[in-house]
Structures are given as structure tokens and as C-alpha cells.
Image (tube, rainbow, N blue to C red):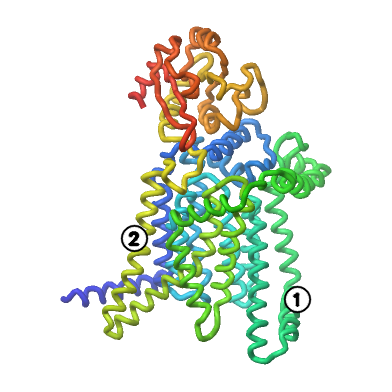
Amino acid sequence: MTDSDGGGRLRVAGARLCERWGVDRITLAVVAVVVAAFAARFYRLGARTAHFDEGRVAYWVLDYAASGNVRYRPIIHGPFLQHVNEVVFGVLGPTDFAMRAVVAAVTALFPLSALLFRERLRDTEIVALAAFWAFTPVVLYYSRFMRGDPLVAAFMVTAFALFVRAVDTGGRRGYFYAGVGFVALGFTAKENALLYLLCWAGGAVLLLDHRLFRAADRGEDWTAVARTHCRRVLGTGWRHVDALLIGALGFLAVVVFFYAPRGETAVGPGLGAALSDPSLLPAVLREATVGSAGALADTWVNSPHQDHAYLPYLGHFLSTLRAGGFAVCILAVAGFVADRYRPDGPSDLVAVAFYWGVVSVLGYPIATDIEAPWATVHAVVPLAIPAAVGLGLFARWGREALADGDRVSAGLAALVVFVVTAQVAAAGAEHVYLTDHRESNQLVQYAQPAPGVQPVMREVGGAAPNHAGTDVVLYGDYFVDDPGATGPRRPACSPWQQVLPLPWYLERADATASCVDSADALVRTVDRERPLLVVARADDVSTRPAALSGYERRTALLRDRDTRTRFFVRSDVANASGGG
């Protein structure tokens, strides 16, 4: 039997299996991408030390689990992760792995949405799109990160795909309702879901503009064409007004469920109390909607968070795209141009996705309050659609050249596909796994601690349950604000913006912490309490204090390029763990 005979029999056997399971090869290919996406995301998912933002949100999840009280905090964005991770922590325990698991799982499933574009994309383009959504380096990096940005991208693009599918199936309401549900989830993940709606509206206006230009080229009255399209939209809305109302109510229900406070908070009683006493329900509904919108405006709109120079932020955004989405950006241009000038006119899907991505590239440097690599996810995800068309174009050229016996053209097309695949794989391996914490990695945000912090906190967490007295002492001007302070954030004596993510590790270990601001106070505290750990900025302890002679010193960066920090671990604790 020849190799070709064996390959043919294998394809026939595969086709029979697909027929028996009721699926086609493209579905199986996308499912294979999803399986690989799960493996890529969950591999050593908990190995990286918690980022500043991860530690902040995870801390409040633990606080919610302990107190039963939670309300919307715009500074940490949507409440989705707080509610969902409160459940996940109850099942898996509060770990770095558990806090990232939901984001990893949602983004691993996200490539399935590519199948919703069956009527708009070719088979190879669907598989390429799924692969870009799964493995583009910046998307993969922040899919292994507890943050709302990859969630809102997955939810909102899935909603967009469902709405497109609803149109392609003649207005099937199931797709519409599912799309509304995903939009609602997007709003619970992060408030910039609103920007997605604005991008879609802008894309729709540009599509209308396309039609008006083509009408003018044909000698038609463009105003009559505009009126026809407007009447069609209004007529469709009127025919489905009941579906629109049901969708609006569903959207409101999801938003209220997540944004409503729980327990007794500063803004009043929570959802549970309102369900027991319906007279409280109007107040809870108002707080979940109007109150949340007001809090959002006060924090992000009527504030100086976006008061920064545009060009440096744009430069940082473009640098991140070059490092983590280069292949997608180049192929998106190729796919858009090829689609733009095809004989039967440009595709609505490709045009909208390209405009959407370009506007995101130009707009997010304005919308963000810091130079945030994760913001590029919002541009890469829509650009992946024209990029898939671009990659599919090269693959199609290669097949056609091979069929015509043109080995040179086929080889060039194969080379392009290979280079793209190799670039994505190499950049992913380098940025996502090998240098996931280093300053040299453009995908790493400044507030990422070095790996050495996590082992130290693991040692303290293992010893804290059996230790009486203060477990951790923060020392020096940098980590100490007011040694006697009390407040809702623990440790209250330390400046919150400077000590994170340590409070997450202390809270999950149920470790007690105190602050000392002088060498004499450090001596007295160490003699009396024998803490498991003393933490100080390196500049505050250039030499080892005599009081810490029985401690093993570790040094690590609390930020990716600075904040050199000394961790003095009590010798018996360090020895019990083999020195970390």
C-alpha cells in the first residue's frame, strides 16, 4: 500500500467518523484549536507571581467571601470576576491558579465563536481565525491573567458573531437573545464594553456609506438609497419589537444581578435582603444601574485618569502590537486590501472588523489611564478577522499554484504561511512562557513582580497557621504609612498602592501583619513576636539589621524593573521549605 493510499483511507475514515458524530471537519478543526488553547492556557497557570492588579482584585474577592459584603468598585472595573471567583475560590481554594482559571477557560472556549461566521468566511479562514484568537501572543499572555480585558473581548466579540449569525439565519431569535446575554456579560466584565457598541455603530455607518458610494457610481439617487436602508432597519426593528424588549429585559437582569450590592454595604442593603423584602428592591435596582453609572462617571469620566500625552501612549500601544500581534496586524492589512478590491465588492464583515480594529488602535491610547499592554487585546481580536482572510488568501494561492504545477508560487505561499505560524509560535513561547515577568518583554506591564516573591509568600502561608502572634512585619518608609492605622484594607498600616500584591498572599494565608517605622521598633517587634517574615525596601535596609541575624535574606523586584525588596524569612521557616 502506498502512502497516498494510506492517506486516502485515513481521510475516508475521518469523514465517516464526522458523519457518525454529526459534525464536519471544520468543526473538528476548531475544536482541536480549542483543546490546544486549553493546554496553552492552563500549563503552569499558577506559576507567575500575582500582578498588582490581580492581587488587588483577588484580595477583594477574599474579603467578599469572608464578609458577605460587596459592592461595585469602578477602580477595579466590572464585578464579574469578584462574583465568579468567590465561587471558584470556594471550590479550588484561593490560589494564583484558581484566580486565573475563569479567564483561561473563557478565552480557551472563545475560538468556537469563529464557527458562527460560516456564511461569511471560507473554511480555512474560520480555522485561521480560531487559531489567531487562541494563540496570538498578547491574547494568550493576558488569557493567563486575571483581568477583565480578555473577558470583555471574548464576550463582546462572541456577541457580535451571534448577531451576525442571527442576520445570516433570517433573524433567528435564539442567536439574538444569546448575543444580548453576552453583551450583558461584557458589561459586567469591564466598562469599556460600551466602546465595542460604539465601534459597531461606527462600522454600520461606514457600511451605509459604502452602499451610498456604490449607488452614486451606478447613477442612482444616494438619498433614495439612504431612505430605503433606514426604512428597512426601522421595519425590521418594528417586526421584532417584542424580541428587542425581551432582550432589553434580559440585559437588565444580568447587569442588575452582577452590579447589585451584596450584604450590608455603604450604599445600603444588598440583593439578598431585597429578595427577602421586596420593598427594598427599587433601591437595589437603582443602585445597580443609576448608582453604578454614577460611580463609573465619577471614577473614570469626571476624573483626571485620562489626562496624559497621547503620542507616548500610542507609541507604547504600537510597540506592544509589534511584540504581541505583529502577524495579525500585517495580515489584517493584506486581508482588508484583498477583500476591498475583490470583483463582487468588499465583505461587510471584513470591512467592519478592520475599521473596528483600526479605531481601537487609535482610540485606546486615549481611553487608558496607564500604558497598559492588555489594552491591545481589544484591537487584535477584531483585526484577527481580516487577518484570517489574509492568511486564507495565501493558503488558497498556494493550493491553486500547486494544482497548476507552479511550484515556485506554491513554495512562496507555503513560506508565508510557515513564517506566520513560526512567528506566532516563537513570540508566544518567548513572551508568554520564557520571559513572562521581565522588563525586556513588551507584553509585561510595569507592576508585575519578579518570580522570587511567590515562593517567599508560599513559605509564609505554610507556616502561618501554626504561628502565634504577628506573622509578617513591614519595615521602613516605603512600606509603612501609619503603624497604628486601622481600616477596611489589610494591612491598614501600609500604603496600598505600594504594597500590592502582598495583601492578597497575606489574606489568603490568614497571616497577621504589622508595621514598624524605626530600627528600635523593629528590634522590639522581632524579639517579642518572632515574625515569620520581615519585608523592607532594599534602600531602607542596605545592611542586614542585627535584629534579623536569625533570618534568611531573599531579594526580589516587586515591580518588573524596580522596587528592589528584601524578604527576611525566619531561618526555620526557610529551612522547612528547602530554602524556596
Is residue 268 shown above or below 382?
above
In which quadrant of the rendered image does the N terminus lie? bottom left
Asked whether residue 151 is in view, the answer is no
In the rendered image, residue 533, in percent from the top left (x then y), is placed at: 47, 20
In the rendered image, residue 524, in percent from the top left (x then y), is placed at: 53, 7
Q: CA distance from mark 1 to mark 2?
A: 48 Å
| Mark nearer the viewer, 1 or 2 | 2
Q: Which residue is mark 1?
A: 234
SS of the residue at dot 1? helix
Q: Amino acid at mark 1?
A: Leu
- Toward the left, the furthest residue is 1
In the rendered image, residue 3, in percent from the top left (x then y), is placed at: 19, 74
In the rendered image, residue 479, in percent from the top left (x then y), is placed at: 56, 24
Asked whether residue 372 is in view, the answer is yes
Query: Is 29 positioned to the left or the right of 171 in the image?
Result: left
Q: Residue at x 73, y 67 (%)?
A: 244
Q: Amino acid at mark 2?
A: Ala
Is residue 423 shown above or below 445?
below
Q: Residue at x 46, y 26 (%)?
A: 565
The answer to the question of whether label 1 and label 2 lie on touching residues, with beta carbons closer than 8 A, is no
Q: Residues within 10 Å of mark 1 (few under 14, many from 20)?
A: few
Q: Which residue is mark 2?
A: 422
In which quadrant of the rendered image does the C terminus lie? top left
